[in-house]
Every structure is written in C-alpha cells, then in structure tokens.
Image (tube, rainbow, N blue to C red):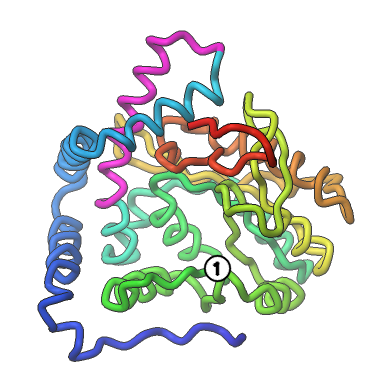
C-alpha cells in the first residue's frame, strides 16, 4: 500500500446528499475567523447543548471517569465531567482552527516545550514514533507540531468522501504525507528512514493485535500491540507529547516529553503496560481535555461482562 494521495474536490459533492456536510464545513470555516474568546464561549454552549440531546455520551463520560478514578470524590468527578463537556464542544472549533488558520495565527497561540528532544533525534537520523493521545484538541496539536517538525500522519479515511476531502487536506497542511492506518509497512518504512510518525495507541481498537493491560484503575484495558510491533521492527525512538489549553489565557502549550527509555522490546504484553503508563501521564496533563466520550473499555476478556 503506497502513501495516500490527496483526494480532489468532485462535482458530485454538490449533490444534495452532501449539502449538510458542505454547510457544516462552511460554518467551521467562518467560525474559525472569529476572535478566539468568542469561539471558546460558543464551544462551551455547543458542548452543553449536544450532551443535553445525546445523553448517552454524557453517561459514557461519567462511566469512564468512575472506572478510571474510583477514589475521586463524586463532586470532583462531576466538576471534571462538566469541564469535559465544555471542551468537547470546543473540539469542533479547534478542528476548524487546525484546518483553516494561517500558520502565523497558530503560532501566536502556541508555546512549545521539549522540541529539543525531536531535534536531537533528527540529528541522529533516528526515526520517532510520536505517542499521541486523543485529547479534544489533537487536530490543533498535530497542526502546531507539524509547523516546527513535520512528520507522517497515520490516516483513517472518512466514509463520507466529501468530508474526507476537507479532513485530508486540513491534516496534510502540517504533515509530509499520510499513510493508511492499516499500512504497517508504510509506517515502518517511514520510521526506518528517520521520519516522525504520529501514532495514537490510547483507544480501544478491538481484539485484533491487542492485549489487556492496566490503564488507570482499570486492570484489563484492551490495548493495541501495534506500538510494540513498530518499535521492535524499526528500532525507533518513542516520544510522548501532550497539547494543553490554558482556559484562562486561550493559549496552548505543546509539551514534548523525553524519549521513553528501557522500552520492553520483543514483549508486547509488557510494552502495552509500559505505553499505557506514558498515556496516563499525557492524559493527566489536562484530564478535562481528554476524549472521555469514547467507550475506552468496551472490549472485555472472554467471559467478562460489559463495563458499560
């Protein structure tokens, strides 16, 4: 499988079946030009409205927080839930910022920490597996990261070809190129060539190529073994990072952490435990900004009941 080619805009996208998609993209584009503080307030309102309509998602957020932080007082979890809902609404606007803002505007809102680790590895010609987590501002984090050190994006094409056109072209702005998420050979080729590859192993991707490892207070979280496969086959460095928004200032800090040492090679189970610890550290940089609405613990070991 070769590197993905950027999709082109087709006349078929003007068909009425895509009008809703085009309207949504148009709204995202127009809102992205509003002052940041207005977008922030609109995002809060959108999150609260959406969670009021789709109550099932709020239940997922509450359940995830209960599973991960059982010792946290109930009132603190409720506060964290509400903050997370506010951030969930803002995610749509942060996606618009990532796709449509000019480079200078992105840089004005972002402070960088730890880029020296990436530069040192680049000088060594070492491939880097960037361990991302699904924070609600991940799109903007990827754009900001790529402005300083562009890399290779791992991409899942959207089933809506019209939306996929805008999504792909928004993400490629700060990446050298994209590889399909199933293209393991393409990822390995990039890592062996000294590239930086974006990888987010924090979600539940099902039983294929997975094991069960602790994540926060959940002892058996279905965790991909893809990280182990990529590291063992390419001898790349593993570097976590986090994108954190300061709610008071509207500025973001992109934090690159030191390369992980003593990675458990040739042991997928131990590697899953090790990587989940790094994921926990990244999430705890701003737990209210993490994608808790994902049913992270939906896949259970054989014979165990659902946690939801």
Element on which disc 1 rests: strand
Assign the magenta stretch its main secondary structure: helix
Highlighted magenta segment, given as a residue range: 71-93
Single out the residue that lies furthest toward the right.
266
Residue sitting nearer the eye, 244 or 6: 6
In the picture, measured across the screen, residue 180 lies left or right of residue 42, that is right
Residue sitting nearer the eye, 124 or 296: 296
Q: Is residue 208 above or below residue 43?
A: below
Q: Is residue 160 above or below residue 306?
A: below
Residue sitting nearer the eye, 19 or 245: 19
Quadrant showing the N terminus:
bottom right
Return the x and y of residue 182 as percentages of the image width and height. Answer: 60, 72
Return the x and y of residue 104 as percentages of the image width and height. Answer: 32, 62
Q: Is residue 138 above or below residue 162?
A: above
Mark 1 lies on residue = 154
Q: Residue at x 40, y 73 (%)?
A: 173
How many marks on residues? 1
């Amino acid at each position: 499988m070769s590197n993905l080619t950027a999709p082109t805009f087709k006349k078929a996208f003007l068909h009425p079946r895509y009008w809703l998609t085009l309207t949504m993209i148009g709204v995202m584009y127009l809102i992205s030009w509003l002052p940041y503080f207005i977008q922030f307030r609109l995002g809060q309102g959108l999150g609260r409205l959406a969670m009021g309509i789709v109550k099932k998602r709020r239940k997922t957020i509450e359940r995830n927080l209960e599973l991960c932080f059982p010792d946290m007082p109930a009132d603190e979890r409720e506060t964290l839930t509400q903050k997370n809902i506010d951030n969930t609404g803002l995610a749509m606007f942060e996606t618009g910022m990532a796709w449509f803002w000019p480079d200078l505007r992105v840089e004005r809102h972002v402070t960088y920490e730890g880029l020296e680790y990436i530069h040192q590895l680049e000088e060594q010609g070492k491939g880097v597996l960037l361990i991302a987590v699904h924070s609600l501002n991940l799109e903007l984090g990827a754009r900001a990261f790529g402005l300083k050190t562009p890399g290779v994006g791992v991409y899942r094409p959207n089933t809506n070809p019209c939306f996929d056109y805008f999504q792909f072209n928004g993400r490629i702005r700060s990446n050298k190129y994209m590889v399909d998420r199933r293209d393991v050979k393409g990822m390995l080729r990039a890592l062996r060539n000294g590239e930086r590859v974006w990888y987010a192993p924090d979600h539940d991707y099902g039983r294929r190529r997975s094991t069960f490892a602790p994540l926060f207070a959940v002892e058996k979280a279905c965790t991909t073994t893809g990280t182990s496969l990529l590291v063992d086959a390419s001898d790349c460095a593993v570097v976590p990072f986090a994108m954190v928004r300061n709610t008071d200032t509207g500025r973001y800090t992109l934090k690159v952490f030191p390369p992980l040492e003593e990675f458990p090679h040739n042991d997928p189970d131990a590697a899953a435990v090790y990587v989940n610890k790094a994921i926990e550290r990244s999430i705890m940089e701003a737990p209210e900004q993490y994608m808790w609405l994902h049913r992270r613990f939906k896949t259970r070991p054989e014979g165990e009941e659902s946690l939801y």
